[in-house]
């Protein structure tokens, strides 16, 4: 059954669920990757190297918080039923944290204040996704889950794309000009000299989310609400029992460990990609915005095509292919500087390194959309018959954040050790390699069915 063939209420609910990715994505596009993070490292922090280290530390703190609470909250949510109230509860700190980013003025004496707001927003964003992801299995038949997941990620990337276009045309000044691409003064009288266009991405993200998250609460079906009495103790007991019996959950534990590595590598690429471009290639807000638009556009296309490939071939081959491509992208990025590409010197002032990095960003976006959508489907496959879905996605979030400090910490250490932002991202390749090797041992329901018929 296709999405279009679902009953009207369910179809509207599916589309509203997809729209939540649209509502959430500008945080990852504008704040975490392409605009605010590079701005913080290059303008708010004392220097780009220490800025990269500080941003990595804040990301690690947020990841540790999510890792500590994700699985227990998922287990409790399974006991209490309805997901929407959990989504709303974590939307509040997300919105507050985004608004707080406006405080990040250039060269501020206490940049950790801004990082605290960032951590608050990041934790809120990730927790809302845990509970929206847990709604996925109820949105359609098992055969359509991959398509729905991929389409949701595609819608999200389009949301990121649209938000970036709005920022470039209404807020950011074009290179060498005091006006935007449309020839307008920055909206609301924003002053580029004090970083106001970059700082405004925080409140912009909060307002965007507040508008486009509404349909999920109104139209997407939720599971029935159950009594919260004793839910914490019972939920934690369920989680403890699941962890004790994890060896009897098929290849779910192997998949969780595999995804721990490759999703952390993917997160590291997104977290430091913009910072890398700003520091190594000298890109400003405009160039970073264009880079983000390219990555978001290819991400939408990759998620959509990945969803189709997922439905046809299953999620595991899709994830495997995406990891291999991203490893190649990492090698290209490591061998790109302002003066050379793949160790081949280029003329001074050449735009070839910029073009190569934009193409690398295009592949990063495409494969990220594909991997994220297929990984969500693969979790449903691995959890089915073993754990409840909210608890499964709690464990999924735990596996994605349990070592979230490792990637940023390794990047910070290597950056300081080598004195090079470019070489600082090299540990990402190792993370992808470990995840790929472990993924080989994950058996999907399709593989298990094939083994039983042999």
Image (spheres, grey):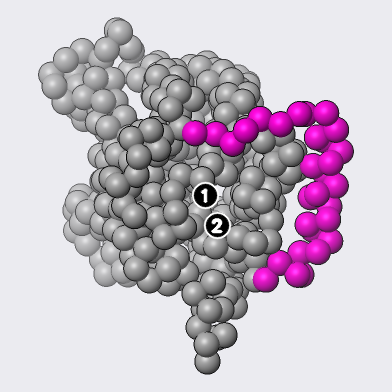
Label 2 or label 1, whichever comes before in sequence order: 1
Residue 230 magenta-drawn?
yes
Which SS class for mark 2? helix
Q: Which mark is residue 329?
A: none
User: What is the count of numbered marks?
Assistant: 2
Which numbered disc, 2 or 1, marks the residue closer to the eye? 1
Q: Residue at x 68, y 48 (%)?
A: 391
The image position of residue 333, as x and y in percent, is 37, 60
Q: Is residue 452 above or below residue 367?
A: below
- Side of 26 where 105 appears, left or right: right
- Side of 183 where 302 appears, left or right: right
Q: Specify start and end residues of the magenta stretch as a single range.
A: 221-250
Q: Which mark is residue 137?
A: 1
Give the distance between the C-alpha atoms of the residues marked 2 and 1, in whole angstroms: 7 Å
Residue for badge 2? 380
Other residues around mark 2 within 10 Å, as few (<14) / some (14–19) / many (≥20) = many
The image position of residue 43, as x and y in percent, is 46, 28
- Side of 163 where 351 appears, left or right: left
Residue 387 magenta-drawn?
no
Furthest residue toward left? 183
């Amino acid at each position: 059954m296709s999405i279009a063939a679902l009953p009207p209420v369910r179809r509207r609910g599916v589309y509203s669920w997809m729209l939540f990715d649209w509502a959430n994505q500008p945080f990852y596009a504008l704040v975490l990757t392409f605009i605010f993070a590079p701005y913080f490292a290059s303008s708010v922090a004392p220097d780009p190297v220490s800025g990269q280290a500080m941003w990595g530390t804040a990301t690690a703190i947020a990841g540790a918080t999510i890792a500590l609470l994700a699985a227990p909250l998922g287990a409790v949510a399974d006991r209490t039923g309805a997901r929407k109230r959990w989504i709303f509860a974590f939307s509040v700190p997300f919105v507050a944290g985004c608004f707080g980013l406006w405080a990040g003025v250039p060269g501020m004496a206490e940049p950790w204040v801004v990082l605290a707001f960032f951590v608050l927003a990041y934790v809120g964003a990730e927790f809302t996704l845990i509970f929206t992801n847990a709604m996925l299995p109820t949105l359609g038949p098992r055969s359509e889950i991959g398509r729905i997941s991929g389409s949701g990620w595609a819608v999200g990337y389009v949301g990121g794309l649209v938000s970036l276009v709005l920022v470039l045309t209404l807020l950011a000044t074009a290179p060498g000009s005091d006006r935007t691409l449309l020839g307008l003064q920055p909206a609301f009288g924003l002053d580029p000299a004090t970083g106001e266009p970059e700082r405004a991405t925080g409140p912009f993200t909060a307002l965007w989310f507040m508008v486009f998250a509404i349909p999920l609460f109104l139209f997407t079906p939720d599971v029935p609400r159950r009594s919260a009495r004793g839910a914490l103790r019972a939920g934690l007991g369920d989680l403890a029992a699941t962890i004790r019996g994890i060896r009897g959950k098929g290849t779910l534990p192997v998949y969780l460990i595999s995804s721990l590595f490759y999703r952390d590598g993917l997160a590291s690429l997104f977290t430091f990609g913009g910072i890398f471009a700003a520091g190594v290639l000298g890109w400003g807000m405009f160039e970073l915005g264009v880079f983000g638009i390219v990555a978001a556009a290819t991400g939408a296309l990759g998620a959509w095509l990945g969803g189709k490939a997922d439905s046809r071939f299953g999620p595991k081959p899709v994830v495997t292919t995406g990891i291999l491509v991203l490893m190649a992208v990492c090698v290209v990025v490591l061998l790109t500087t302002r003066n050379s590409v793949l160790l081949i010197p280029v003329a001074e002032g050449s735009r070839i390194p910029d073009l190569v990095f934009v193409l690398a960003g295009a592949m990063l976006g495409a494969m990220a959309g594909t991997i994220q959508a297929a990984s969500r489907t693969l979790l449903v496959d691995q959890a089915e018959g073993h754990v409840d879905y909210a608890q499964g996605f709690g464990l999924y979030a735990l596996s994605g954040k349990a070592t979230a400090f490792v990637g940023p910490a390794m990047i910070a250490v290597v950056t300081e050790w080598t004195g090079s932002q470019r070489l600082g991202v090299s540990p990402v390749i190792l993370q992808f390699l470990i995840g790929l090797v472990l993924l080989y041992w994950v058996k999907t329901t399709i593989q298990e069915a094939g083994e039983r018929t042999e």
